[in-house]
């Protein structure tokens, strides 16, 4: 579901291209431990014709980030050209 030109800015601030993200996902798929990740606070906003912004919070076992993904409707269906994660500061 990632666009061919997909890229992201991770919670670490690192810019990552599609190939790297797919490699990380493949590695995680092979891990035996289950991930107790929780999502919440979903919102979706129209940015323009066939383009939407999805925002949500992701809790990865106590590491909380705010996520934003741009989704675009293309001929092959919905694809994501961009995603960003921002670490939530401890208060």
Image (tube, rainbow, N blue to C red):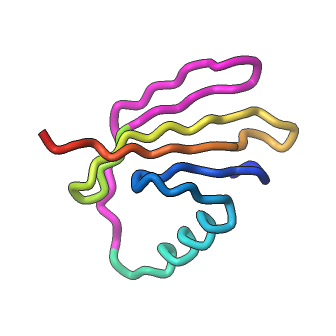
Q: Is residue 54 magenta?
A: yes
Q: In this rendering, would 20 be left or right of 35?
A: right
Picture quadrant of residue 88: top left
Magenta-tinted stretch:
34-56
Q: In this rendering, would 70 be left or right of 48?
A: left
List x then y, in percent, for residue 36.
29, 61
Q: From this view, report whether residue 9 is shown above or below residue 26.
A: above
Q: In this rendering, would 63 be left or right of 82?
A: left
Q: In this rendering, would 35 be left or right of 6?
A: left
Residue visible at 52% across and 24% down in the picture: 44
Residue 1 visible? The answer is no
Residue visible at 49% across and 81% down in the picture: 30
List x then y, in percent, for residue 23.
60, 73
List x then y, in percent, for residue 84.
51, 44
Picture quadrant of residue 39: top left
List x then y, in percent, for residue 77.
78, 40
Residue visible at 63% across and 43% down in the picture: 82
Residue 71 visible? The answer is yes
Q: Is residue 15 magenta?
A: no
Relative depth, front residue between 16 and 43: 16
Relative depth, front residue between 85 and 32: 85
Q: From this view, report whether residue 48 is shown above or below residue 14.
A: above
């Amino acid at each position: 579901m990632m666009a061919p030109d997909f890229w992201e800015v991770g919670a670490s601030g690192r810019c990552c291209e599609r190939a790297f993200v797919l490699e990380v996902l493949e590695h995680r798929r092979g891990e035996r431990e289950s991930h107790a990740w929780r999502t919440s606070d979903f919102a979706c906003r129209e940015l323009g014709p066939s383009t939407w912004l999805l925002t949500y919070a992701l809790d990865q076992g106590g590491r909380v980030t705010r996520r934003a993904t741009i989704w675009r409707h293309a001929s092959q269906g919905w694809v994501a050209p961009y995603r960003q994660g921002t670490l939530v500061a401890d208060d």
